[in-house]
Amino acid sequence: MDTFYSSFRSRAGPNVNATAQSGSHIIAPVLTNNTITGGVHFLHNAHAGFTFDRPHSETTQTSATRSLIFKHKTRICSEYRYVTEYNSLPGERVLLSERYTQPLILQRHRHQQEREEELRSSGEDFQQVLSSRSSDKSVHLNSLFNPDNHGISPSAVILQGNSGNGKTLTVQKILMDWASDKLYKERFEIVFHLKCKEINRIPGRKSLVEILSYSCSLTPDQISQILQKSPQKMLFIIDGFDELRLTQDNYDMSPHTDVIQKAPAEVTLCALLRGHILPESFLLVTTRSTATDKLSLLLKGPQRFTEIMGFSEKGVEEYFQKFFQDEQLFRRGYTFVKTNETLFTACSIPVICWITCTVMRDRFTDGADVTSGLETITSIYVDFVFTLLDHHCQGLSQPVPILLKSLGQLAERGMLERQVLFDEESVHETVSDSAKNPFLCKFLFKRRIHQETMFSFMHLSFQEFFTALYYVLLDEEESQKKLAVLLNHNDCYPPDFPAVWQFTFGLLNKAVRHTLMKKHGLFFHPNTQACLKKWILKKFHLNCLFDSGALFLLHCLYELHEDDFVKEAMESLNRLYTYGELLRRTDCWALLYCLQCCQSIKKVDLMSSSLTPEKLMMILPVLHKIKHLYLILEDASESDLGKLLCALTRGQTLNAQEVLVASQIPDVGNCSINTLDLSISEQLSSVHIGILSYKDPAAPLRSLSLTSPHSELININWIELFQIITQNDSDALINILYFSKLKKMAILVDCLTERWCVWTLQIIQNCPSLTEVKVDALFLLEEGIKILQRSRTRPACVMRVEGSVCHKLSQKCTEYKDRELSCNQKVMIHLNSWGFSMEMLRKSLF
């Protein structure tokens, strides 16, 4: 070791430190807009001040050095191939390739407006925001050290990210890919990994080679041998700078420049970060945002700032696919998450993505429905909070209950003042040791010629969650006082900040309360629970819920997720209206759960909510519990309508039900189903199908009504029937209606032609149970009347035909000017087993 030290100093020259530091000032301009231009590693000419004056033969790897590096790579491949998860049992691991999904990484600072946009948006809007960011200065792992648009490569890269955003896993991926010759093969001959959490535990005074030996399988002498070669091809990854225990004494200690000089481990690491040791080497440092400003002042230049934003929509999908490794399970899980706006937003945080997948996998393993396992958004947030508390909160200076209350107090202040960004003073007044708090993010914004420090929660939804947690953790008197003021303000609902109250009800869930008590002794006073439950029951006892207030209360029940209480609330409800409210996917989950808990509900009106087929499928399993149901479907296909009819007829539990469906369908094909009217009773059930034509204003069939015993409606292939109707295939329609128990049939046509008369008589002949046939026509053609005059029906079957007699030829009957002249007599035709009769009714309008 001493021999190496002397050799190292003699080759570097007596003024190496001065030269290095002088060089660093020459080539470290202030970079305000780093960009990626591609290309291989480029050493700027100004780097000459960093280069040791050693012969070429000494900088070339020897076989011994190559052997040591190979050993180092082999060890990394062996150890870093696997991931130990938070809930792993002893010896239990999963492959890194089954978990790692590259997050979105940006290479620029965002201004205040962009930050607020990210914090406030959710669901699809949030993913659109991320998508806009990904097209602007996003980078991949292989381009972190690429030259900028001035041709300068960074000596140090800051990789900032919130807790749980995947910084450590990204570092593991970089190391694994480098050791496998998939990343930085030509750029870096050796990569070392230093974990600040482990450096904190290194006792005494240590040199750099000794610190490095703690993190790899090489001895200090072997590391010394490697460090003699090509320092400009070395990368040091410093993981978790925010966890490094630094004091002012660490900053004030005299810098040292030798890889074997001993000092406290933190001081030695700081010397490496500053470039006092191995100034030609490269650094990649990960940190939370709360420590980025300190790091940038300590770190050598040129620097590059990058930030892990989390998963994009594509990233969430890829993570689910890797996690489940089964197409069916992946689709079930991902579809559920994507239909829940709040959860889908939260899944941009990789740790929440893992928690969600883990919960779902447990439910799949148990054979349960996915929704029964992933009960509430609150439960996922609680799991996330305690994951960070258990694994990302080393060295906190206060107990967890006090920490959570202080965060809640800050969150409530922001909610009341309608702000998501907090100034440094207000944060320090409320939250102690904010730099180590994993739930807060820190930003620097330019204010004229100054910088301003601001804080935020990871997302507005976390601010809402901590506000709710604050309310239920307060003592009984103060908690009820705050809740009473906010919930009873003007006695209206939804109250301000509905998400806060939904989280509040979610925190009252028995399983969630048990977790909070068991983990950290957090106690909710029973009277607080009683107060909230009494309030919501009062709203339901009004018997009628309207608009956004109705959806808000359903969400509160969903988050509470106590079946017996939800049943009690829903049983007192008669009517639910959503006038003027567009139903979100999250609303559909809440509606689904609440209807599952009740026996039935009298009336639900979703006519103004415009359900998409996707949302319809979500609530389909419970629609049969609604006595009077009214809804509008957007862009519904024949298949969507068929599934709806199948669910309503086959899942029926009510003695009577009326359903009215209006369908908004684009101009495709010849005609479309535009209304469905279903009436179910104990004796007979009927369905009325309204048909709208786009291309043929005189389409032959305008509506079809079928009445039969309820059991027979179940047997109809509704999807096939609707397809036949939209295709105008009357022959195929005869075939599908040939079932034995049809009691009544009614049709509406434009013109009663010979073909429609023959078609109707064929159905009467082939359906022996048919007792009544009603045909309404705008115009009765002579050719059709002549067919009826020569016909009879079966015994016990009566046919009635009503319309205006038209004396024109059939091909001219569609012209309204001809109808007005010659189709002005309204008649009723009766046809039974005795024969034909016709009565005059009144003059037609035509």
Image: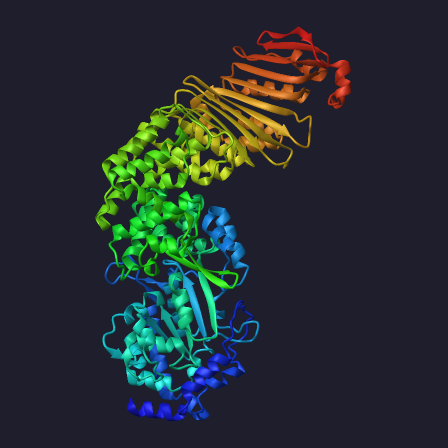
- Asked if residue 197 lies left or right of residue 733, the reply is left
Indicate whether 343 appears above or below 666. Answer: below
Question: Looking at the image, which residue is at 53% across and 61% down?
Answer: 448
How was this image coloured?
Answer: rainbow
* Residue 741 visible in image: no
Q: Quadrant of the N terminus?
A: bottom left
- At which x and y percent is residue 525? 23, 39
Question: Looking at the image, which residue is at 49% across and 47% down?
Answer: 124
Which of 826/26 is in front? Answer: 26
- At which x and y percent is residue 443? 44, 59
Which of 218/440 is in front? Answer: 440
Q: Quadrant of residue 434?
A: bottom left
Indicate whether 548 appears above or below 98. Answer: above
Question: Looking at the image, which residue is at 32% across and 90% down?
Answer: 4
- At which x and y percent is residue 137? 53, 63
Indicate whether 454 appears above or below 194. Answer: above
Number of callouts = 0
Which of 68/383 is in front? Answer: 383
Which of 626/691 is in front? Answer: 626
Q: Quadrant of the C terminus?
A: top right
* Residue 513 visible in image: yes
Q: Quadrant of residue 296?
A: bottom left
- At which x and y percent is residue 476? 25, 38
Q: Quadrant of residue 378?
A: top left
